[in-house]
Amino acid sequence: MALFVSLLVIFLFPSRNYAQGPPSPGYYPSSRIGSMGFNQGFRNLWGPQHQRIDQGTLTLWLDRNSGSGYKSLSPYSSGYFGAAIKLHPGYTAGVITSFYLSNDEDHPGNHDEIDIEFLGTTQDKPYILQTNVYIRGSGDGNIIGREMKFRLWFDPTRDFHNYAILWNPSEIIFFVDDVPIRRYPRKSDATFPLRPMWVYGSIWDASSWATENGKYKADYQYQPFVGRYNNFKIAGCKASNGVSCRPTTGSPYGSKGLSSQQYAAMGWVQRNYKVYDYCQDSARDNRFTPEC
């Protein structure tokens, strides 16, 4: 009888199971790139009173007064860009913690962007990691996003995990702990970001859309909301380097895509943890996203 009750409890009230991880990708691009301190590659962009560095870890926080953000010291035309991030636990609805590439300041109203965004959540649900790509103003005005969203196979509030964007002239790859979770290939110039971008990170209030399309808002009785970053990695071609710089790759095959072992790991993540794909959304008009 006790066994029956235990099984019934597990069935009716399943716990979050973070035990099983993906198969090994067999190739670890982050291990080939040295870490840098925050001040070696970045500076504060906004909210300086909500940002501090302590023993190599950058802490950003959001309260009812402000959030905070940072920016790289240089723009890049391609590269590998990563950081280890630890997220805030508990109620974080409406709050976005991000790491991304953008040229919005250089091309306002007509910008490119590659995003890793952690969508805050209520206390009973896991974080969602949103990846996104905007090309030449598709993130401005009438927004045309290319979102793919994932749950994670671990609790991102308990420890630091490595998140990275690889962007070169042939592809964009999103990594979590060196596991590729999404590959966005260059199918045409019209659907791929080609202009130099800066590297950014931030924590901010996006209550209008972040959590279940704005159903749940930031609740400042739980403030401050904190995001922690360390182990920054940049291996890129600065915009000033011109064509002499060799683009970074994310696989043992160079710029020819992922290895079979990496594809297997990515397939496992997408089968088990992908929760949204813009190309599979029947409500979307794919005339605006011809790569689908």
Image (cartoon, rainbow, N blue to C red):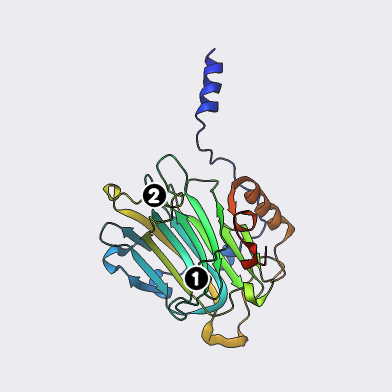
Quadrant occupied by the N terminus: top right
Please name the residue that numbered disc 1 is placed on: 101
Q: Residue 194 falls in which quadrant of the image?
A: bottom right
Q: Which mark, residue 21?
A: none
* Residue 25: image location, x then y, percent: 66, 55
* Residue 136: image location, x then y, percent: 55, 76
Tell me if residue 17 comes above or below residue 227 in the rendering: above
Seen as rendered, the residue at the extreme top is 1
Tell me if residue 50 comes above or below residue 277 in the rendering: below
> Is residue 62 rendered to the left or right of residue 141?
left
Name the residue: 34% across, 72% down.
44
Q: What residue type is labelled 1?
A: Leu
Q: Residue 45 falls in which quadrant of the image?
A: bottom left
Please name the residue that numbered disc 2 is placed on: 93
Q: What element carries label 1?
A: strand
* Residue 195: image location, x then y, percent: 55, 80
Quadrant occupied by the C terminus: bottom right
Residues 104 and 159: in front is 104
